[in-house]
Image: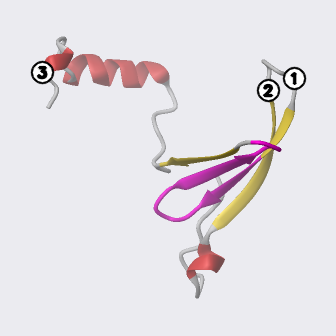
Amino acid sequence: MPAYDLMADRESDAQGFVEQAIDCSECDRHFTVGIRNTGAGLVAELQDENTPVNVIDDPIAGPDDASEMEAYQRENLPDNPGQIE
């Protein structure tokens, strides 16, 4: 994840940015994805010749171990999804 610089003087200077190469296993094409940390979220931008795609996500890290998340869900979420408020 690109770092966000809290000590920067301007918002535009604070935002972290990295580019990553992605290979699609379905179509064997190669793409470049730009990932920007706005401080409030991550914005991933994929641009091919035809379709611009923007994905926005919360930068809060999840647990490293998937079993931790499953254990949390078993303990804290109801069996019936209709009970979730």
- The kind of residue tagged 3 is Gln
Left or right relative to 54: residue 78: left
Which residue lies at the image location 58% right of the left edge and 88% below the top edge? 9
Above or below 73: residue 34: below
Q: CA distance from mark 3 to mark 2?
A: 39 Å
Q: Please say if 44 is above or below 5.
A: above
Q: Which residues are magenta?
A: 33-50
Q: Mark 3 touching mark 2, by CB under 8 A?
A: no
Is 20 inside the magenta-drawn segment? no
Residue 38's image quarter? bottom right
Colour mode of the rendering: secondary structure
CB-based contact (under 8 Å), mark 1 and mark 2: yes
What residue is disc 2 on?
24
Q: Which residue is mark 3?
A: 83
The Cα atoms of the two marked residues, 1 and 3, are separated by: 43 Å
Q: Residues within 10 Å of mark 2 (few under 14, many from 20)?
A: few
Task: Report the disc number at residue 28.
Answer: 1
User: Which part of the image, by quadrant, shows the C terminus?
Assistant: top left
Q: Earlier in the sequence, mark 3 or mark 2?
A: 2
Relative placement, left or right, of 1 versus 25 is left
